[in-house]
Image (spheres, rainbow, N blue to C red):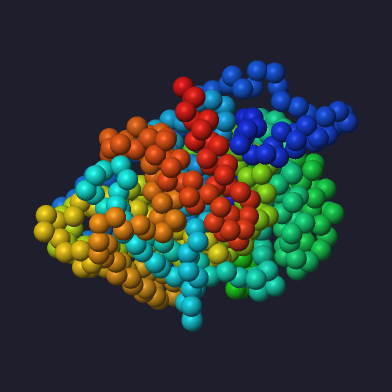
């Protein structure tokens, strides 16, 4: 039975995100060991947060002729790290590196107003086509997925292992201190029967807290608050101990997960990304998920964190302020439980489409054979989570309005090791000129326009920050259930600030 660990890798942040309204107040009020209050260091706003960070090069997907290859397949990507890293940079007045901008993570950072699954399914699919805002005559295909929502009382028991990097690079109020605050908030939301263990690593690996029931929250939070950062980083050895601990206290049918906290700079023992990936993959049959979250800049190994989460069937987020910590660990904690596993999508285009281009998902593209292979690893979708993908289409010269343009098939497993289930959706080119798609279509297009502009993509066409604002504004307030944290309004504020960045 194929199963996976999710390691939530929390990597340290260097500063406070101006777009997160609570970040400054949090650090202003947080007491230091000597009883004084922490505040921003003078001149922080002048620091370039991206210096020394590591990202894999992105080679954007090209246009493909339907006559050459009518089908396109990809694994879903539920990560949001790229968006919050961008926010960190823009809030400091610096544009992120183009290779730090992954369009799919901009899209999937947000929750969309999509229909929920029905019947026995734990996943739903929808799609629509409208005009492409940045390329006259082109169309945009939006594919939307939504995982089944699960009530708090119906969530399975949790077996969490907090794997915390306490090396010197994690030192600081915006790294280890922020991490400690977030973990304590998570503990407060756990049920008495959930379990927590804490493993720390720097020059050596220590079992700080053996698996403990969350009903003893005081004991767990005392261990969290004792965390201090110093020394080198023996991440590989610590990761193995975490898997062993998760296996020892494995909860059948539960949410077995490692929460790892690091900037990804492993410099003692197993250090290469390839060796770490091999280690993660060796535990795929243990029933434990691996999710990764990052904090920090200046020595941040994004490429390593993303690769580990991809191969561990987990998610990867970047924590840039207290609000983001609360978003991930409190408001959206249900997403730690996967309702759709090994989820992949295939789009089969008709003769009404001349060419297509998948926007983003560059490192998630699959062969059509892999789409059909039920044993091929793919991405996970958490409870209540939405996933969005966009294709830019060039219609055929003689396309028929209203005729089918694409057949979309999504395969997923309710549980790892199950046989795949299949969902399909057809979508056609609008039946008349001037057709207006949904506001969620415009929101997705606006996010893509923003990302393409930041990347200075060769495919950006007429995309601009002004265009992104105009597209996003009508969908700014979709309703409290879709955007309870007001993230879309903050996005507009970020775009306005991006206009003055270097």
- In percent of width and height, residue 481 lies at 60, 61
Residue beneath the point at 61% across and 36% down: 19
| Relative height, residue 309 to residue 385 (above, below) | above
The quarter of the displayed image where residue 168 is located: top right
Picture mark count = 0
- In percent of width and height, residue 415 lies at 49, 72
| Relative height, residue 122 to residue 257 (above, below) | below
Q: Kindly tell me whether residue 183 is visible in this rendering.
A: yes
Q: Nearer the viewer, residue 368 or 197?
A: 368
- In percent of width and height, residue 343 lies at 41, 64
Q: Residue furthest right?
A: 35
- In percent of width and height, residue 407 lies at 27, 68
Q: Residue furthest bottom?
A: 119
Q: Is residue 67 left or right of residue 320?
A: left
Residue beneath the point at 44% across and 64% down: 145
Residue beneath the point at 37% across and 58% down: 437
Q: Kindly tell me whether residue 7 is visible in this rendering.
A: no
The quarter of the displayed image where residue 396 is located: bottom left
Q: Is residue 141 left or right of residue 86?
A: left
Q: Nearer the viewer, residue 386 or 175?
A: 386
Residue beneath the point at 88% across and 31% down: 35
């Amino acid at each position: 039975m194929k199963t996976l660990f999710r390691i939530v890798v929390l990597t340290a942040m260097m500063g406070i995100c101006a777009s997160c309204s609570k970040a400054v107040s949090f650090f202003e009020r947080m007491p230091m060991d000597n009883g004084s209050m922490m505040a921003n260091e003078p001149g922080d706003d002048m620091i370039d947060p991206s210096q020394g960070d590591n990202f894999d090069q992105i080679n954007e997907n090209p246009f493909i002729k339907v006559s050459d290859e009518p089908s396109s397949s990809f694994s879903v990507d539920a990560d949001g790290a790229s968006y919050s890293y961008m926010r960190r940079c823009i809030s400091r007045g610096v544009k992120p590196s183009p290779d730090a901008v992954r369009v799919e993570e901009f899209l999937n950072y947000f929750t969309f107003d999509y229909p929920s699954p029905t019947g026995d399914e734990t996943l739903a699919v929808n799609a629509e086509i409208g005009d492409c805002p940045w390329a006259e005559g082109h169309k945009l295909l939006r594919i939307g997925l939504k995982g089944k929502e699960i009530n708090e009382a119906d969530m399975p028991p949790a077996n969490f292992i907090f794997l915390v990097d306490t090396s010197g690079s994690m030192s600081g109020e915006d790294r280890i201190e922020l991490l400690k605050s977030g973990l304590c908030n998570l503990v407060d939301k756990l049920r008495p029967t959930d379990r927590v263990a804490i493993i720390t690593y720097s020059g050596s690996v220590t079992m700080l807290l053996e698996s403990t029931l969350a009903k003893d929250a005081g004991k767990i939070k005392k261990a969290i608050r004792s965390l201090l950062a110093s020394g080198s980083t023996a991440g590989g050895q610590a990761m193995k101990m975490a898997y062993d601990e998760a296996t020892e206290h494995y909860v059948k049918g539960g949410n077995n997960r490692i929460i790892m906290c690091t900037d990804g700079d492993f410099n003692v023992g197993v250090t290469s990304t390839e060796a770490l990936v091999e280690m993660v993959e060796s535990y795929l049959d243990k029933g434990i998920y691996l999710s990764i979250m990052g904090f920090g800049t200046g020595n941040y190994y994004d490429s390593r964190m993303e690769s580990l989460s991809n191969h561990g069937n987990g998610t990867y987020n970047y924590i840039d302020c207290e609000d983001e910590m609360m978003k991930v660990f409190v408001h959206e904690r249900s997403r730690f439980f996967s309702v759709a596993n090994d989820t992949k999508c295939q789009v089969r285009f008709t003769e009404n489409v001349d060419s297509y281009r998948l926007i983003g998902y560059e490192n998630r593209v699959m062969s059509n054979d892999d789409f059909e292979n039920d044993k091929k690893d793919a991405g996970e979708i958490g409870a209540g989570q939405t996933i969005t993908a966009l294709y830019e289409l060039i219609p055929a010269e003689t396309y028929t309005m209203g005729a089918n343009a694409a057949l979309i098939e999504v395969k997923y497993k309710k549980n790892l090791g199950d046989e795949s289930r299949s969902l399909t959706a057809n979508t056609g080119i609008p039946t008349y000129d001037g057709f207006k798609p949904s506001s969620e279509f415009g929101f997705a297009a606006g996010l893509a326009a923003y990302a393409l502009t930041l990347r200075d993509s060769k495919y950006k066409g007429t995309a601009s920050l002004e265009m992104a604002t105009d597209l996003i504004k009508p969908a700014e307030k979709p309703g409290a259930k879709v955007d309870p944290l007001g993230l879309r309004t903050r996005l507009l504020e970020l775009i306005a600030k991006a206009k003055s960045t270097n």
